[in-house]
Amino acid sequence: MSRLLIIGCGGVASVAIAKCCQNSEVFSEICIASRTKSKCDAVAEKWRPTTKTQITTAEIDAMDVAALTKLINDYKPDAVLNVALPYQDLAIMDACLEAGVHYIDTANYEPEDTDDPEWRAIYEKRCKELGFSAYFDYSWQWAYQEKFEKAGLTALLGTGFDPGVTSVFVAYAKKHYFDTIDTIDILDCNGGDHGYKFATNFNPEINLREVSAPGSYMENGKWVEIPAMSIKREYDFPQVGMKDMYLLHHEEIEALGRNLPEVKRIRFFMTFGQSYLDHMRCLEDVGMLSTTPVMHNGVEIVPIQFLKTLLPDPATLGPRTKGKTNIGCIFTGKKDDKEKKLFIYNVCDHEECYKEVGSQAISYTTGVPAMIGAMMVVQGLWKKPGVFTTDEFDPDPYMEALNKWGLPWVVDENPVLVD
Ligand code: NDP
């Protein structure tokens, strides 16, 4: 029996909330707190008749650390689940430390204003020293290690699907299948079709920033950076079929590279259709992906935020999306001195997700692991003082929970490798 404060009420949060309500034996009480309280009230209304979980709602600007600390102190949750945006990560971690509760999120910190000179100076130093130029990285949250350790609190970072489940797959492969892992390829395939010429499956601002950035991978402990979308492969995904996929920078590479230095190469690929890529290139070329404010008819606007207003809300894609996702990790390495390869993956059906919780599979595959991560922490199965990613705990209870809560996984011991 525990009490969870959930911050944010968008696509991912809606699924995490639905799953907490299905799991009322663990989550006996939840409070949904977000910037727009009417959204929290609507979601609460939807699930109340179906669950024993007591649901309350609150309005909060999570960037206001004092107000958030007060909310946490008033509600007294066992943990805070941050499913707002990566911009809020540090403010929510500060409030958790202030109030003395555990912290869980699904995406690592990135700043809303990438032109902020103070942030930019640190960013440029990191680009030079480490050799990857994505706006997001773990250094900001890893810097909280000592504070969480001293406070005896757990911060669990990145418990979505990727990052999140993918890193649990790595820990599981290492624990049960390999003596040494040599290479890891993380493959994220969305074979779904929503019928729009262009839409993003989760928050457009975050999604487009990620996809338009240079790609990078880790080889022998060093970052190799490449122009955006310049490494392309084809892969025949089980239950989805042949898709084009492109090498991207992704946050779990950074954490896995640090925690498993023996792995020689870690790459991340995501599938994209030609229409998505053509639209994205065009939007980038005309400046619509810029985060730098511009004046328009006397009003200051941020181009990528204006674009978000124009694009379909990812939360509305559910009823239109058909097809499946396949996300997983392909490993090579050795067991008992023999070469070994392995593919662990989950297949998720957009229409099934919509039937169950009213969301498409991208929100579902993130919201379910968000609930599971919170469950691991509040049940004490994953609890140690400090700041950790999902590869740093025993994978077994999490893997079991994936099977139970809607994301069953498959182990293929003879997969086709990516060249
Ligand atoms: P949405 O844009 O749908 O939802 C974001 C929510 O956060 C909205 O309810 C928004 O409120 C709220 N919010 C924004 N700013 C604040 C603030 N200052 N204070 C309080 N609430 C705020 O995003 P998604 O649901 O698509 O994504 C949620 C998170 O999940 C993101 O961090 C994203 O990066 C991550 N993610 C992780 C994945 C993974 O596999 N690890 C995959 C996909 C997403 P309002 O309604 O008022 O705008």
Image (tube, helix red, strand yellow):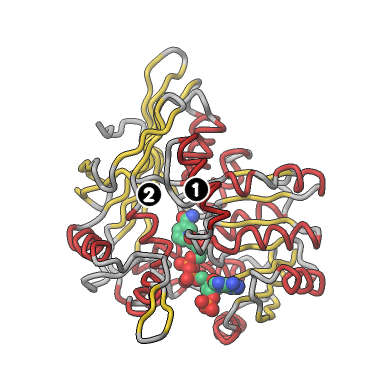
Q: Circle 1 sits on which residue?
A: 165
Could you say which is closer to the camera, residue 23 or residue 225? 225
Whether residue 322 is situated above or below residue 330 in the rendered picture: below
Q: Position of residue 382 (x, y in %)?
A: 68, 46
Whether residue 52 is situated above or below residue 219 in the rendered picture: below
Q: Is mark 1 within 8 Å of ligand 1?
A: yes
Q: Are marks 2 and 1 in contact (CB under 8 Å)?
A: yes
Residue at 19%, 48% in the rendered image? 242
Q: Mark 2 is on which residue type?
A: Ile
Left or right: 231 in relation to 403: left
Whichever of callouts 2 and 1 sits on the residue coming sooner in the sequence is: 1
Distance in Å between CA atoms under marks 2 and 1? 9 Å
Whether residue 216 is situated above or below residue 312 in the rendered picture: above
Q: Which label number is shown at residue 178? A: none
Left or right: 4 in relation to 209: right
- Quarter occupied by the N terminus: bottom right
- Quarter occupied by the C terminus: top left
Q: Secondary structure at mark 1?
A: helix
Q: Circle 2 sits on which residue?
A: 327
Left or right: 345 in relation to 399: left
